[in-house]
Amino acid sequence: FCLRPQSRANGKFRGGDGVDRQILFRRSMALSILTERHVHQPYGLNAGENGQCGKNLLKRVDGRLVNLDGKSSVQMEPGVSHLKIEYQRNE
């Protein structure tokens, strides 16, 4: 878990930095993701500009990246290295 540096939108009121989360899977399991703002940017408020769209990236052990939709279900296997969730917070 970490803040994405300089990920705030521009404008009079810049909102907050986005957040990255990485989850390592060591066992087989069903994963369901319910996230928002992956197609349409979060809109800015009070003269702030729009934020960035979020991403759910699944990195497989072979290094291949798979972009998952904002609302997804996928079977995770121990060979999957990690899931990276990026999202922008805008206030």
Image (tube, rainbow, N blue to C red):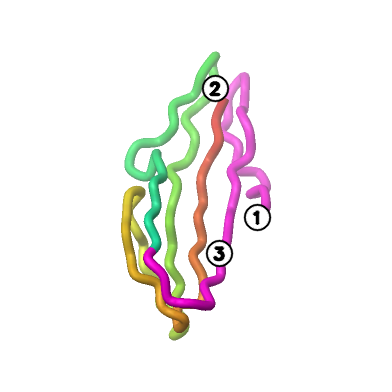
Q: Quadrant of the C terminus?
A: top right
Helix, strand or loop at label 3? It is strand
* Range shown magenta: 1-30
| Residue 58 image position (x, y, % from top left) | 43, 67
The mark found on residue 42 in the picture is none
**In the image, residue 4 above or below residue 78:** above
Mark whose residue sits in front, 1 or 2: 1
* Residue for badge 3: 23
Residue furthest toward the top?
46
- Regarding mark 2 in the picture, which secondary structure is present there? loop
Return the residue at label 1. 1
The residue that mark 2 highlights is 48
Image position of 66 (left or right of 63): left
Between 56 and 4, the one lying in front of the other is: 56
Q: Is residue 35 above or below residue 22?
A: above
**Residue flagged by tag 2: what amino acid is it?**
Gly
Magenta: main secondary structure equals loop
Residue depicted at 49% across the width and 35% down the height: 51
Tell how many labels: 3
Which mark is nearer the camera, 2 or 3?
3
Q: Residue at x 58, y 56 (%)?
A: 21
Across and down, in percent, residue 11 comes to 58, 24
Q: Say if the magenta span includes residue 73.
A: no
